[in-house]
Image: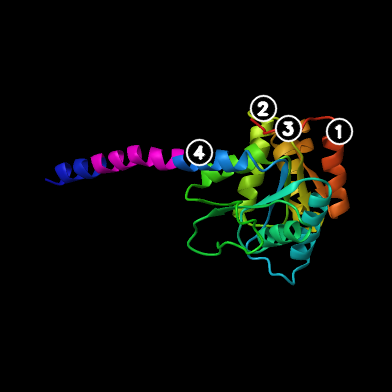
């Protein structure tokens, strides 16, 4: 009897998985339709827990303003903290301000600086990540937690494996990123040879909004602005 109940439950799971495809497709279709119309944008990542009085919140706001003044829009994860700062800077500078929200049990809620027609909601992290990678002309990565690191390393992996074209990945805050970068170079590269020497060129570490814009401008003097795959 237990086996029959177990098999029945397993079949119900398989049926639910099949129907989930349509929801996933719906998120992709909605995302592609809206994101394809926004124009060149740069994504800003960072912690949802960063408070408005924090130095990095203020820096993210300044970076976003500079990005808009350089001719790009700004995409964030749509929530509080660094994401809010990015959208706020873009909004105050009169630029495109996009928020890709995800339903989470804590931390996540829409911030008020997203353009009304450019706020998208996602249930699936992997669909949301596709939108970031496909429609960003650069990643600006502020101090953050696991989610920020996830976005960073996925982008570098896709570029490293040539699944997408290269684009600028800019880590802001040498004090925050220094230990990780040392570990990447000393442990991953030199001690265990788990990456190639050129892989450390996939990212740059900076401390000011001016340096962010210099990297973006330098890169796009050589490459056309277009979706990444």
Of the two numbered discs 4 and 1 on the same chain, state the one appearing first in sequence.
4
Residue bounds of the magenta highlight:
11-25
Q: Which residue does the numbered mark 1 point to in the structure image?
A: 221
Do tag 3 and tag 2 residues touch (Cβ < 8 Å)?
Answer: no
| Cα–Cα gap, marks 4 and 3 | 25 Å
Q: Which residue does the numbered mark 4 point to in the structure image?
A: 29
- Which quarter of the rendering shows the N terminus? top left
Q: Which residue does the numbered mark 2 point to in the structure image?
A: 162
- Which quarter of the rendering shows the C terminus? top right
- Mark 2 element type: loop
Q: Residues within 10 Å of mark 1 (few under 14, many from 20)?
A: few
Q: Residue at x 68, y 56 (%)?
A: 46
User: Residue 49's mark?
Assistant: none
Q: Residue at x 77, y 39 (%)?
A: 168
Quick one: 38 or 199, which is closer to the camera?
38
| Cα–Cα gap, marks 2 and 4 | 25 Å
Of the two numbered discs 2 and 1 on the same chain, state the one appearing first in sequence.
2
Question: Residue 176 lies in what quarter of the image?
Answer: bottom right
Any part of residue 137 in sight: yes
- Mark 3 element type: loop
Q: Which residue does the numbered mark 3 point to in the structure image?
A: 166
């Amino acid at each position: 009897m237990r086996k029959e109940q177990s098999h029945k439950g397993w079949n119900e799971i398989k049926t639910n998985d099949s129907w989930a495809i349509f929801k996933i497709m719906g998120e992709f279709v909605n995302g592609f339709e809206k994101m394809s119309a926004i124009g060149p944008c740069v994504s800003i990542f960072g912690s949802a827990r960063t408070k408005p009085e924090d130095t990095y919140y203020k820096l993210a706001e300044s970076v976003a303003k500079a990005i808009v003044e350089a001719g790009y829009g700004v995409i964030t994860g749509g929530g509080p903290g660094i994401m809010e700062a990015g959208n706020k800077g873009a909004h105050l500078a009169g630029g495109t301000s996009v928020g890709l929200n995800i339903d989470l049990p804590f931390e996540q809620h829409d911030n008020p600086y997203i353009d009304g027609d450019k706020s998208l909601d996602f249930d699936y992290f992997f669909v949301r990540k596709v939108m970031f990678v496909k429609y960003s002309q650069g990643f600006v990565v502020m101090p953050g937690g696991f989610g920020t690191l996830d976005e960073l390393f996925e982008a570098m992996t896709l570029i490293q494996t040539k699944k997408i074209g290269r684009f600028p990945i800019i880590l802001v805050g040498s004090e925050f990123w220094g230990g990780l970068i040392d570990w990447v170079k000393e442990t991953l590269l030199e001690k265990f040879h788990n990456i190639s020497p050129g892989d450390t060129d996939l990212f740059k570490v900076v401390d000011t909004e001016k340096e962010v814009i210099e990297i973006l401008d330098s890169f796009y003097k050589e490459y056309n602005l277009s979706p990444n795959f």
